[in-house]
Image (cartoon, grey):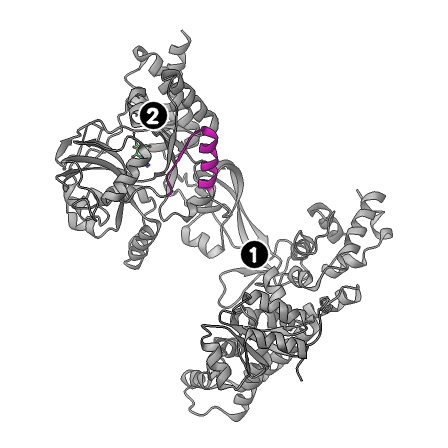
Amino acid sequence: MEAQARIRALTGLLNEFSYRYYVQHAPAVTDVEYDALYRELQELEAEHPELIAPDSPTQRAGSDLSQDFQKVPHIRPVLGLANAFSDEDLATWQTRNRRLQPEAAFAYTIEPKFDGLTLVLTYEQGVLVQAATRGNGVVGDDVTASARTIHSVPLRIPVADAPPPPPLLVVRGEVLFTKEAFAALNRARIAAGEPAYVNARNTASGSLKQKDARLTAQRDLTLYVYDILHADGPLPASRFDRLNWLHQAGFLTPADAVRVHDLDAVSARAEWWKKQREKLPYEIDGLVVKVDDIELEGLLGVTGKDPRGAIALKFPSEQVGTRLVAVRPQIGRTGRITPTAHLAPVFVGGATVSRATLHNYDQIAQLDIRIGDMVTVKRSGDVIPYVVGPIAAMRTGREQAVAPPEICLECGDPVERREGFVDLFCPNAACPERVFQKVSFFASKGAMDIEGLGPKTLHQLISEELITDEADLFALKAEQLLPLERFAERKTNELLKSIDQARTRPLHQILMALGIPGVGGVMAKLLLESFNSLETLAAMASKVRSLEAELTAQLPPMDEAPLALALRHAHLKSPETAIVRKLDELFNVPQTSEQVLGLLRGILKATDSLLAVEGIGHILVEQVIRWFSDPQNMRLLEKLKAAGLGLEQTAKSRASAQLAGLTFVITGTLPFMSRAQARSLIEDHGGKVTGSVSRRTSYLVAGTRAGSKLTRAQQLEIPVLGEEALQQLIKDGNN
Ligand code: IVH
């Protein structure tokens, strides 16, 4: 008989898998695969109960009973949930239910599925009298004392002025750690020299089952309630309405529960949750889809331990174990070397992964990750997959330590470890891999948008030494390309055409494509509002750097670069005094020389306009200055300019030039326009808008509720304009 053979095979397989998982800690299959086989067995056994073997894994009644707690019977079986992993699974589930109840209209309530443990709470006349774990579903452990320590467990309901509850009420919920509470617990453990906990769910379970409830009280647990097991009295007839009822009574209930009327809406909601789940304060491992009509749910009945009227729609597992095959250094465009894990391919978070990041070599050593290890890999949301850590219990002894590279494997230069950085760097700007990364970023979509320059082509051009930096792209000629392998006439022409088109990209796009750390699209535009050309920026930067060099010569050696020190204090009312105080503190010399003061003033003055750009902080200012004073970068700008790229801002088409040469700051609420509208009005007429009031500000445009900017303008005696006066100024000009 076919079913019998299959049941026997599945029983054997699943038992072997669970031995590998629980005893050997060497999972042979993923959770999803295991669950699929388990379900197949469950279904076959439901059809042929006479074939259930005593060693069937389905008979391993999941139980959290422990010896020390008093056992209490549940008023009603505390059921579990069957799993679904796809839209097809949901459709099968619905079809089966429809067959059982052909007349019924199906609506569904969809809730997040908490990754915690069940707690059953009993209230008599609104007073909490008992809390029990699920146990085997029939009897549970009495954990009343522990449960009372959880702040979200109401000791008496209703909490506010909701209607009184029925005389006897039994509810069911889930105890868990919020992400923040779990992180805080681990921070405290690490600070106390104890190892961090890995699994929030197990830790929550352990915390609840402390014999001494004072220990539970030290753990910041939370309870969410989603079900009513029993009530002596009338209740809403729908799941969705019951959630509201519970919420009213004073319980925390699942966030963002909705009621929908078909499976398409369920799928749409599942897609929404996949993006949303990151934002929840707690971990969820899927959704629960429940037939909304409680009576209908009852009519559908139960299979084994699961109600037919509800199903768990599980998200793909985000964390799995796999083999670490190799660790290879990857070099970024700044020369930073990131160790990359090469993995045995594994399905995680909805995709097959064979690479993951390992952050840096210090961390590899700290976590003691070795080549050949089974490692845990996490892939969730938009985060790049990363290696969480090794599964040390699964070592064979043949694993090998990871040695950080001493030379760059791409160019052979010795790698550098910079003061204060955890990362290793390849210092060679001409390193072919660095050139590759830089140029491919430069050409990428959203940067210079050069088509036809895929990785293969670019590698080829670099190894032919046709390209050593971004600017070399613009010097490429058909005669150089045509003799190369895979460069037919058409491909050559298309590439050259697309490079040619890139010559006319607007300046903010060029600036962004240069890949200056911290300068993305938005920042590039902001910078160009204060600096019309890259040359002005470069001139400022080189001036600042020479002042810094002089300053360094004047000061004893210090940990922080003098430029960083100056910029860090620049936003203060009197930065010089603050810096002088800091220097005295550092070097214990009560008098700072006039020369040092002069240099400091020079730096502050030169960087004033850059610091005034709204949204730019001192760290970014320092990065921009360092980039624009690096001779190699200056050579690049020269080359780009020679190639015909516009490194100056071309004047926007303007309504007028009435406000040319004037600098404005806008503050408060204007009567008829938004601040953004006021800004474009000013810019359209040739004026400049900055973020903070300084001596260079020509006018402050102020609406109602203007705060500190108005006070500052008044102190500096800068004229203040209302909206109408601004319009007038545009009409009359600044005469
Ligand atoms: S309803 C008929 N709703 O998931 C009611 N359970 O994998 C059956 N769980 O044992 C349970 N969040 O401990 C339900 N919103 C939710 C849930 C939920 C988490 C747990 C529950 C159950 C397990 C099944």
Mark 2: secondary structure: loop
Mark 1: secondary structure: strand
Majority secondary structure of magenta residues = helix
Quick check: 597 above or below 330?
below
Q: Which mark, residue 337?
A: 1
Q: Is residue 615 left or right of residue 219?
A: right
Q: Is residue 269 magenta?
A: yes
Disc 2: residue Cβ within 8 A of ligand 1's nearest atom? yes
Choose between 597 and 138: the one closer to the eye: 138
Q: Is residue 218 left or right of residue 579?
A: left
Label 2 sits on residue: 309
Quick check: 720 above or below 628?
below
Could you tell me residue 606's position as x and y percent? 60, 81
Q: Is residue 459 magenta?
A: no
Using the rendered view, name the quadrant where residue 231 is placed: top left
Which range of residues does the magenta coloring cover? 256-274
Residue 264 visible in the displayed image:
yes
User: Badge 2: how crowded within 10 Å, few (<14), some, or many (20+)?
Assistant: many
Query: CA–CA distance between discs 1 and 2?
Result: 53 Å
Could you tell me residue 273's position as x and y percent? 44, 41
Using the rendered view, name the quadrant where residue 46 is placed: top left
Quick check: 245 above or below 308?
below
Q: Which quadrant of the rendered structure holds the N terminus?
A: top left
Q: Farthest residue toward the top?
A: 1
Residue for point 41% across, 23% down: 93
The amino acid marked with disc number 2 is: Gly
Could you tell me residue 710's position as x and y percent? 48, 79
